[in-house]
Structures are given as C-alpha cells and as structure tokens.
Amino acid sequence: MSVLVNKDSKVIVQGFTGTEGTFHASQMIEYGTNVVGGVTPGKGGQNHLERPVFNTVSQAVEKVGANTSLIFVPPAFAADAVMEAAESGIKVIICITEGIPTRDMIMVKEYLTDKDCTLVGPNCPGVITPNEAKCGIMPGFVFKKGRIGVVSKSGTLTYEAADQVVKAGMGISTAIGIGGDPIIGTTTKQAVELFMNDPETDGIIMIGEIGGQLETDAAKWIKANGTKPVVGFIAGQTAPEGRTMGHAGAIVGGEEDTAEAKMAIMRECGITVAESPAEIGKLMAELMSVTA
Amino acid sequence: MNLHEYQGKELLNSFGVRIQRGIVVSSPEKAVEAANKLTEETGTSWWVVKAQVHAGGRGKGGGVKLAKSLEEVKSISDDILGMNLITPQTTVEGKLVHQVLICEDVYYPGETETSEFYMSVLLNRSTGRNMIMYSTEGGMDIEAVAEETPHLIFHEEIDPKVGLTGFQCRKIAFNLGLNGTSFKEMTKFVFALYTAYDKTDSALFEINPVLKTSDNKIMAVDAKVSLDANALFRHKDFIELRDTREEDPTEVEAGEYGLNFVKLDGNVGCMVNGAGLAMATMDIIKMAGGNPANFLDVGGTADAKRVEQAFRIILKDKNVKVLLVNIFGGIVRCDRVAQGIVDAYNNIGDINVPLIVRLEGTNAAEAKKLIDESGLKVESVILLQEAADKVAEVLA
C-alpha cells in the first residue's frame, strides 16, 4: 500500500534532459524508482539515462504507461507542464520547481478541479516511499522503512524529522513534501487524510510553518476524524511579522497564522505539539511506546 | 517587491485607475516647482506633502502634511526630506526620507460630502483565488476595523475562468452605499483596479483611502503595491522600480550572492540549508536562551565560496555573539561543507565569536572528524539537540 507512490508507480520526468532533471532522475533510478522515461519537447525519439525521451506527456502515457510525473522544468514553464501532465492522464504530479508566479498557480488550481489527478507541490522536495520509490530530490538513505507517515512544507526539515524517527527506533511509511508556496496542490489536511486511511501507517508527523491556514484546517479535521496519533511542529516561532522567510508562503499576515496560534489550535485538537524541532522523533517514539 | 506610493499610483493610472495626482521630488525647491505645476494642471490651491518610504502609518509619524501656501510647501518639504520617519511599521530608528510626493488637494468642498473607503486586492490562500476586500470605513487602520466592526468588511472572490464580472463591480459599489455618478465611477474604478492587479502579476494592492470627492469622482489617494517577485521575468520594466535604499544593505548584498537572508536583531547568527530548517534553527536558538540575529538559507550548494560569503554577511552584525551552522546534508555532502567551513574560517582569519557547527546527513562522521582535526576553534556536533545545548552553554 503506502500512499501516492510505490514500487508499481511508472514514473516520468518532465524536463528530463536538463541539468536538474538529469541529476535527480539518475539519483531516483539509482534508488530503484521505476523511471520509465522522460519528456523534453523537441528531443523525442532520443534515449537519455537508458530511457526513452518523448516530446509530449501523452506520448509517454501511451507508449510506456506513465502514471506519475516529476516536474523539473524552469518556473516560467512549470505551470504549463503541470497542466499538460493532468490533461494527459497522469495520476500523481509532483512539481519540484521553485519560483512559479502565483498567477500561474491560480490558473493551475482551477484547471485541475475537474481532472482526476493529485498534484504535490510546487516548491517541494517530492514524495518517498522507502525501498519502493523515491520521487523527488531527498536523500534516500535517511528514510528507513517503517510505519510513520510524514507530511511537511519543508525539505531539509523533513530529512531532519525522518532522521530523528529512524534514530528513535522507528521508520517511515511515506514522506510527503507538500511545498512552501502560497498555492499548492496537496494540502496538509489531504496528506494527513491519506495517512489516516493507509493501513501501513501507524503514526503521523505533521510539519508546518508560519503563514496560511493549512495546519489549522488539518488540525480541525484530525479532531473530527483522526484515528492515529499525530505529532506536530510549526517552524518560525521567532519569525518577524510581514517578512517572507525563504518560502514564498512563509509570511505572517495576521494573528491567526503565527506559529503560536497554529500550535495552540493543534494542541486543542489533540495533536502532540513539539516545542523544539529536536523533539519530534522523541515525542513520536513516546506515542508509539518505542524505545530506541 | 514593494513599490513607493508614487510608483504604485503611476502603475494604477496606466490601467485607467483615477488617482490623486502628484509629482515626486527630492528637494524643497523642486517641491515648489511641482506645486506650481500641479496648480496649473489641476487648479488645486492647497497641496499635500507625502514622505515616500516603504512603510505604512506615515501620517502618524508626521510624514504627511497639508500645505496651504507655497512657503509651506517649501518648509514642510524641507522638514520631511532627510528626516528619519518613525511610524508604527518602522524600526525605532525610523526610515530616512529621500523623496516626497507633492499632491493635489482632493478634499475640496463641493455639492456633496466626501467619503473615504478601503479597498485591497490579494490572494485568498484558502481558496487559491484572488479577492477584493473592501469597506465603508476608509482612511483608518483596517486591522482595527476588522477587530471592532467586522461586519463592515466585505469580500468579493474572483473566478479565474471569467475574471471580475460586471455584477461583482456593481455589488461592490452598492455595498459602499453609492448611487448616480459616483456609483458608475466606482464600478469603473474597481474594474480598472482589478485589471491592473491581474496584468501586472501583483501580490497585493491596498488602496486606503479610496475617495469619493465632493464632485462624485472616485480616486486612489494612496497606493500600496507589492509585485510578485517570481513574475518579474514577465515584466522586465518593473525591475528598475526596486529602491534598494528602502532595504537593509546587508540583505541587498546577500541577495547579490544568491543567499536568502533576513536581518533580525538577536545575538546568535545562523547559517542553515533550507528555509524550514532555518526557521526551526532560529526557534531552537530562542529555546537555548538566545535570540536569532538573522534568517539565512544558504541553499543547495554550500560550497566554500558561499559559506565564506554567508559568514562575512553574518559577522557584519556586531551584535552576533555566537555563530551556529546547521546543515542537513542530503545531496550536499557534509564533508564538503566542512571543508568549506574550514577554508572560509582560514580565509576570513579573524573570527572572534565561537563557531558551533552541526552537520548531519551524508558523510556527517567524516565531516565531524575533519572539523575536529582542523585545529580551529570550532565546536562540532551531530545532533540538533547538542547544537542547542552548545549555544546555551556559550551564552551562559
């Protein structure tokens, strides 16, 4: 089972022959991900990393049965790439690209409303199901197989959390990096819901940051529907109001989207909140009654 | 990217939004010339002198004043230019005023009373759509309106498939209590305003106040405009609108090196890879009894050159008592980063604050060994908690 990606995912890379696409596709292949090809308009018919290159996503779907796509194309063309993947019947679209204009993402979100697909990202590290599929830019070795699901807005903080989970004697079922932009495909709530319904996940780590309402929405959903223990952390307790902290979406606009406000709501909703980012793994182990 | 009021107004006006007219100047003499010119063009007999800085609440700090004679235009401009304007949104030191906008007086008496409204255009993050937020309570602090009279704030969300519709513009004008000429003027104003927002890839428009004049014109008296920095590739002509004098000089320098840096006022400097981990590192500094002196995401390539640039930027701040490096090496190998730190340390030469380095992930053990054997005054740890403990120890 696991969620979103697994050993049966047939993965293509959009922006396959570019520097980023090439590097990360090689890493994914090395990890054992089932990469079946890639797309670079104008380079169709060539071979790259011993896999076929297609001009369009629909050709990749038709010829090699692709159902999952990783997007590494530059920001100016990334929105178009997401819509092409959706139109072509790709089921899981993971957009790594950082710096897509908000106006483009408003269009993408609208375009996807009647398409049967899931978008993860943009501006995210991707999704990994250990020992099955690494669909992203994360270091695979950190994510040892286990039964804890991780959803996070941040890349390196996800690696940090996964590392703590492993050191505390547990492992990861799937880790989903949902991205740090103001508009993203899969929300914290949707990712949590996937884990609640996944028989291979026993506990959930939810990592958020200042800005927006995603963690609040997820917390309220957990209070009403949650069946598994959840540990939460919100980065940016010391961030000043009105300044963007690296991620385009990480900006405190009002009292409701500060770290304090989010942590308070998460506590009210029964989530075990880590005050310090160094305690995430330890708290999960306590909830799971695991000793390292 | 934030614009000055005068730049924002020019941008709005280019899309047909009526604005209070003005001329930006940087000397009292030019201010008088501008006032004369405005009177020729608009017939205004009074003028408003407005400080041009990137901060709200300028009026409260004495940065916006009415001048009833040319002598007053000159003396007020002389006072405001070169002052450190302190407003509720600036630091205690305030912001140096380089330019003033000399504006026509639009509150002249006439057939009807003037009224002030509030209007902004922004992204509703929960729905992923743009919205127009507006209120009958203009000219005031909108946060206060939201707090005390939330029923006087209205929202209109825009469907991306069709854009802002005619009925939505009418609804806004009705809700603002307008009729006749001013009603028609408002529908045009709203449509032009949204068009400008959409076509320029803006991230925020805030017009406070939107004024109904005594002769029933609708105009923007102020304009806070923020552009989506990610969309500047489509609007090359906007790049020159950036005024780096309004930004922290260290942040500007860091930006030139491709470092994502925000200056803060604490005593512990930090260099981290990744925005989320950087924020988390700031939090852990606070828990260890310190205060973060900055946010710094060094990005995916933490090589010797970038590490050195980052160190130099952080160490410019004399409040920094400790420097904490927190790198989770994924694709980036920790031993390479460690070598970068050693090289940077040697190149800079006189680092007088304790350096705590936490390297975890790919080749972390090799990295720790490399640093421990370098002979430098660097504390090396692997766990995040150890890093926090070291910071607390140094500060104690």
Image (spheres, coloured by chain):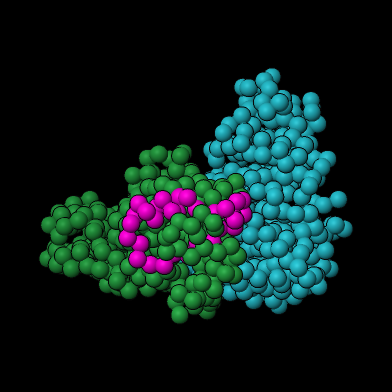
Q: Is residue B126 rendered to the left or right of residue B117?
A: right
Q: Residue at x 71, y 38 (%)?
A: A30
Question: Which residue is painted at 54% across and 50% down in the image?
Answer: B335
**B247 sits to left or right of B176:** left
Q: State left or right for residue B232 relative to residue B77.
A: right
Image: B176 above or below B131: below
Q: Which of the two residues, A35 or B360, is positioned nearer the viewer here?
A: B360
Quadrant housing residue B141:
bottom left
Q: Residue at x 59, y 70 (%)?
A: B385
Q: Is residue A116 visible?
A: no
Residue A275, compared with residue B187, is above or below; it is below
Q: Position of residue A100 (x, y in %)?
A: 55, 44
In the figure, the green chain has which letter?
B
Q: Is residue B39 above or below residue A50?
A: below
Q: Position of residue B176 (x, y in %)?
A: 51, 65
Q: Which chain is cyan?
A: A
- Foreground of the two, A279 or B147: A279
Tell me which segment is drawn in magenta.
Answer: B338-367
The foreground one among A81 and B302 is B302
Can residue B346 be found in the magenta stretch? yes
Q: Quadrant of residue B377?
A: bottom left
